[in-house]
Amino acid sequence: MSHEVSHCGALARSGPRIQQWTETATYLTYRPLISKVKAMCAAKELLAEEPKQKLLPHSRRQEAAVSILRTTDYLRRFCSRLFYQHGITSQQYNVLRILRGAGPRGLPTLDIAERMIEQTPGITRLLDRLEAKKVVRRQRPSSDRRQVLCYITKEGVDLLRKLDAPVKNQANAALRMLKDSEIEELIRLLERARSAR
């Protein structure tokens, strides 16, 4: 009994020290959390002082540009299936049409690249593939060995003849919901937009 009393007395006398130690331990345990909370509060105050960023008004021009890009992708996918059935891509079809239009004179490689619907830096690889399919041939004229002229072959012309009617039908089907007058207006507006380049 006397031992318990003396033990309680010792605890009572050391009470302030235990309380101080407990407070110190608690502070050390939560110090990282406290510092983070303080940093967050300071950042919040700084943000509150900064002027509110005004939202840009909705751009109808941007919406029109996105709509044109989406329509381009729609038309490309619409025709790609047809080209795939004949073993070519839309870009290869474009090259064949350009060379058919050039006639027996042919065209230099760079001229083809400039006339393409889709500008491509890989025109040489594109022509390599068409030459491998025997639908295009290339030749260096004796007058200028640095220049390469490209020609469509008979096989290339025959392939285009097979594709002429189906491609026309595909284009009509893709834009069937537009009236003739709307098509004319669409062409006019798109040409006007491109002239701003």
Image (cartoon, rainbow, N blue to C red):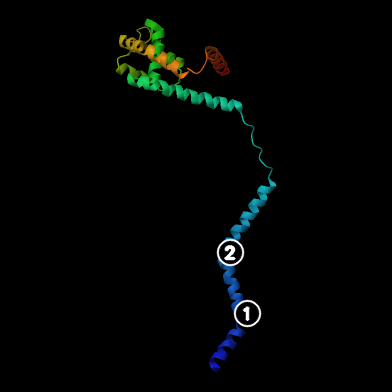
In the rendered image, the vertical position of residue 179 relative to residue 44, given as above or below: above
Task: Say which residue label 1 marks.
Answer: 16
What residue lies at 32% left-to-right and 16% top-to-bottom? Answer: 131
Q: Residues within 10 Å of mark 2 (few under 14, many from 20)?
A: few
Image quarter of residue 153: top left
Residue 150 x, y percent position in the rendering: 37, 12
- Classify the position of the C terminus by image quarter: top right
What residue lies at 44% left-to-right and 13% top-to-bottom? Answer: 111
Toward the top, the furthest residue is 104
Q: Is residue 42 left or right of residue 143?
A: right
The amino acid type, in three-letter code, at marker 2 is Arg
Question: Do tag 1 and tag 2 residues touch (Cβ < 8 Å)?
Answer: no
Query: Which of the numbered marks, if any, corresponds to residue 31?
Result: 2
How far apart marks 1 and 2 lie (CA) works out to 22 Å
Residue 102 x, y percent position in the rendering: 41, 8
- Classify the position of the N terminus by image quarter: bottom right
Q: Is residue 42 left or right of residue 89?
A: right
Task: In this rendered view, identify the residue nearer to me: 23 or 83.
Answer: 83
Q: Residues within 10 Å of mark 1 (few under 14, many from 20)?
A: few
